[in-house]
Amino acid sequence: MAKDLLHFFGLKEDPFTLTPDPAYFYPSSSHNEGLLLMDYAIDQKEGFLIVIGEPGTGKTTLLKVFLEKWRDRAETAIILTPRLSPEEFLIAVAEDLKLKVKRKYKNEIIKALRNFMMESISENKRVVIIVDEAQNLPDETLEELRLLSNLETDREKLLQIILVGQPELESKLKKEKLRQLNQRITTRVLLNKFQPGETHDYITYRAAKAGRKNLHVDRKAEKIIHRRSKGTPRLINMLLSRSLMAAYLEENNTIGTRHVHNAIKSLQHSDMHIPITQRAIPLAIGAVAVALLASSLYMYPGKLLKEIKTIPPGKMLSAGTEESAGGPIGGGDNKEPVKSAVTIPSGKVASIITDFAYIRVGPSVDTKIAGWSATGNLFTVMKEATDERKKKWYQVMYKGEKRWISEAVVEVLNMDNMHSGL
Ligand SMILES: Nc1ncnc2c1ncn2[C@@H]1O[C@H](COP(=O)(O)OP(=O)(O)O)[C@@H](O)[C@H]1O
Ligand SMILES: [Mg+2]
């Protein structure tokens, strides 16, 4: 978000980023209950626990809050990219727990894990394996997890497992071949969307955290935000970021219905034809446009170009690029302008879920690195590809070039689906 905008609203930082930041955790009734159940289950050494929630309801945020709480009392392995075979999965767990394994064979790793767990238990520490987006775990890997959870002493479980995922996870576990695993699950947490009053409190709370007490949102505007987002925090954030921008452009410090409608419209523009020359943007860009880019409106350059025309000259900067993305590493810096029209066929948007994500020249880890990006940044997906390892890659625009990003570091949202909710 642009400094001018933050200053205008009296904010220290952007209150509505898409990063799952535990510092901004708002304990809605459902989130609070979820956290209590998780605490209880781990405290009681119950084996398996699942957390279910639709995209954007705060699963990853809840995980991070949980991890902070248990940091000193548990050894945790967190798997964020679960499309892994049983072996790959075990290796990832061992690496995350910083286990020293001489040869990366399955039984060696399991032996090392067992020793590690015995040691941890003697220090009265829990060992917890957490899988985010667990609906993506292959069945064989789920089965491997079940076998792992069998590790126990005659008195107690050595390992606890938390699977976090979208509602498909629940249906997946109902499959006949996963029946045994399903029976092991002792605690189920369901994350609900916010109630209307919670949406209000959530907005107020996040704004206050970011430095602005009493951010003024018109009652009607707030109602529209709640209705259109259905109380989904991620959508609330997207709407609020854009509404703040719209209000700022009018130098109005109350968010009104007009600004929210504006925000909704900008979210619906993701499937247009966008004639864009990369050079045109940096030259014309103003502080506000930089903010638009940084606050991830970059995926709607058509809208962006329109808004640039309305920026008063006083707010112009000489140049700018996507500030939210990192600089190029290792010679991927290609300044050729893109002249062709870019079509966005799918309405799919890739949101970075890791702290650090490489952007590559081609759809494979064997290609050159063009640069990097960080959590919460959004890219419109232009194409999809699969590499030799059967991993998916998404083609995105990065610094004006068609680049590729791995499925391992993104979550893909379908904006068309969101529209039906907006
Ligand atoms: N209880 C909450 N408190 C504060 N922010 C939340 C909460 N739930 C969700 N969010 C915000 O909503 C967005 C999506 O949350 P995330 O945890 O990534 O959802 P999920 O993992 O379920 O897709 C993030 O910006 C996050 O900060
Ligand atoms: Mg998540």
Image: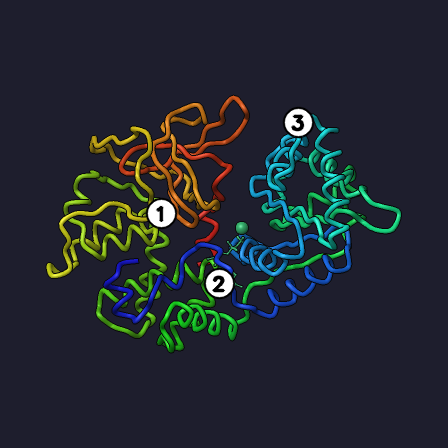
Q: Residues within 10 Å of mark 3 (few under 14, many from 20)?
A: few
Residue 27 coordinates in the image, percent (x, y) = 56, 68
Spatial CA span between label 1 and label 2: 31 Å
Q: Earlier in the sequence, mark 3 or mark 2?
A: 2
Q: Against 118, is 230 above or below?
A: below
- Label 1 sits on residue: 270
Residue 182, horizontal then vertical, whole percent: 77, 47
- Outermost left residue: 313
Disc 3 versus disc 2: nearer the observer = 3
Q: Distance between the residues labelled 3 and 2?
A: 38 Å
Mark 3 falls on what kind of element?
A: loop
Question: Which mark is nearer the camera, 1 or 3?
Answer: 3
What amino acid does circle 2 point to? Ala
- Residue under the point 21% across and 49% down: 305
Q: Residues within 10 Å of mark 1 (few under 14, many from 20)?
A: many
Colour pattern of the rendering: rainbow
User: Judging from the image, what secondary structure is the residue with disc 2 in?
Assistant: helix
Dot label at residue 102: 3
Which residue in the structure is indicated by mark 2? 23
Inspect the image, locate mark 1, and give the three-letter code of the amino acid beneath it: Ser
Q: Nearer the viewer, residue 329 or 251?
A: 329
